[in-house]
Image (cartoon, helix red, strand yellow):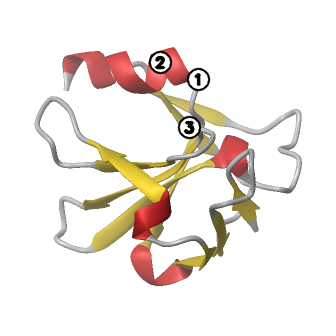
Amino acid sequence: MGGCHCGNVRYETECELDGALECNCSHCGKKGFLLKFVPAALFKLVKGTEEDMTEYRFNKKHIAHKFCKNCGVQTHGQAVAPDGSETVAVNMRTLDEELPQDLPITKYDGKSA
């Protein structure tokens, strides 16, 4: 389980806390995201609707960054993976479960992508 700060947006997902991706693009870097990509079928909004969220797209506009209209916390992004499958980038910092101190983090050079 996870969600935004005010609780208007809540989600369930199946993702292992076995690693995260840290992107240095202008968006992710400024927000300090730790991301975990999961198939869209493993992500479900349990509270909130599209009307409770705002979408932000930038650069190539491939990722729909979703955030709560009330508190502004970005819980996830939706996109299509290079293999054509629908995927969700979960902002692991919005999970209810505390992240392990020794969580392996893979650096991604989004500035060059």
Residues under labels 1 and 2: Cα distance? 5 Å
Q: Secondary structure at mark 2?
A: helix
Residues under labels 3 and 2: Cα distance? 17 Å
Q: Is residue 15 left or right of residue 33?
A: right
> Measured from the top left, where is residue 56 in percent x and y?
30, 41
Q: Is residue 64 left or right of residue 60?
A: right
Q: Which mark is residue 32?
A: 1
Residue at the spot 62% in from the left edge and 62% down from the top edge: 9
Residue at the disc numbered 3: 72
Q: Amino acid at mark 1?
A: Gly
Q: Report whether residue 25 is seen.
A: no
> Measured from the top left, where is residue 94 in percent x and y?
70, 48
Residue at the disc numbered 2: 29
Q: Nearer the viewer, residue 80 or 74?
A: 74
Residue at the spot 59% in from the left edge and 40% down from the top edge: 73
Residues under labels 3 and 1: Cα distance? 14 Å
For the N terminus, the quadrant is: bottom right
Given this view, does label 3 or label 2 mark the residue nearer the observer? 3
